Amino acid sequence: MVLASLVAARALGQAPTSTTTTQERLGYPRDARLLVIHADDAGMAHSVNRATLEALEQGWITSASILVVCPWFPEVARWARAHPDADLGIHLALNSEWTPFRWGPVSPVDKVSSLLDDEGYLPLVEETVLAKARPKEAERELRSQIDRAVAAGIRITHLDAHMGTVGGTPALIEVYRGLGRKYQVPVLLDRSRPYPPGAEVPDAEVLVDRILEMTPGVPVTEWQAAYERMLSPLPPGVYQLIVHLAWDDEEMRGATWDHPDWGAAWRQADLDLVKSESFRNFLSQQGFVRVGWKDLAKARAVQR
């Protein structure tokens, strides 16, 4: 779930003509199409972990990000310590969106009271966070999430935003960018998405031209065809394809029973997609170059 459309989008590919492209800074031709295949929500549930960690091990995806606030975070941390070269970021969370399956903050609740709903959880929807969250409390909580991951032995490659909430106001975007500077990792920002009026997002910090993901309403039988239609016409640039992986099992059906979008069947369809030989053949035929956030971090370093 990515940065919400709040104002008119900036044009895809708009960048200062005096700079080289991200592709060129990584040693690829200017007309290359680089693709990060990224899985959100590791740590959410055992089913999500089973699917995501297998996908990383098999090379079906190139990166993933972790929900530190969730109950199955320790399982991801154990795997990460055994796989220190894995491309893992932190999925910074200010929301807890599933009605039967909730989580709260990492920080002491009395220190981040503006981040809680009436039941003491992180709120269900982005709008509640944007209306209530105090930026200093949001920063405290997000730093706690990162620090918990670091203390657990995870080598963090990047930061991104669960449900896009951290990109919802100028103050939260500044917190987000500041965390990238503090921990010296890139943050997911994309050139084609809008930012709130007044937000400062220097183009030099933007490494991805467009974020892509499945949208509600596509039948599972048309899943790969929809992804192919999404990817085929893309011009040269750097793209992140976000998938949400899990098995359609009892655990996931229970957690997402009233929310079919991004639910159990959806996540099984994404898993079936990334593991399919036909999809990998499609990417190869299209000439996409698969990269991860470790690669993009090198482009950021060169730019500095």
Image (cartoon, rainbow, N blue to C red):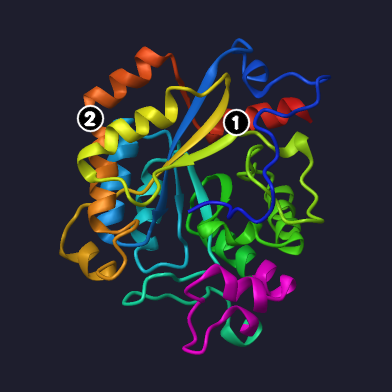
Q: Residue furthest top?
A: 29
Mark 2 or mark 1: name the one nearer the start of the chain: 2
The residue drawn where x is 25% and y is 37% is: 222
* Vertical relation: 163 (above or below) 141: above
Q: Is residue 206 visible?
A: yes
Q: Position of residue 279 (x, y in %)?
A: 28, 26
Q: Which residue is mark 2?
A: 276
The residue nearer to you, when weighing 17 against 71, is 17
Magenta extent: 113-140
The residue drawn where x is 36% and y is 16% is: 284
**Residue 44 on the magenta span:** no
Q: Which residue is mark 1?
A: 296
Q: Quadrant of residue 103?
A: bottom left
- Tag 2–tag 1 contact (CB < 8 Å): no
Q: Regarding mark 2 in the picture, which secondary structure is present there?
A: loop
Q: Position of residue 179 (x, y in %)?
A: 69, 55
The residue drawn where x is 52% and y is 47% is: 89
Q: Position of residue 281 (x, y in %)?
A: 29, 18
Q: CA distance from mark 2 to mark 1?
A: 26 Å
* Vertical relation: 7 (above or below) 227: below
Q: Nearer the viewer, mark 2 or mark 1?
A: 2
The residue nearer to you, when weighing 223 against 189, is 223
Q: Residues within 10 Å of mark 1 (few under 14, many from 20)?
A: many
The amino acid type of the residue labelled 1 equals: Leu
Q: Quadrant of residue 72?
A: bottom left
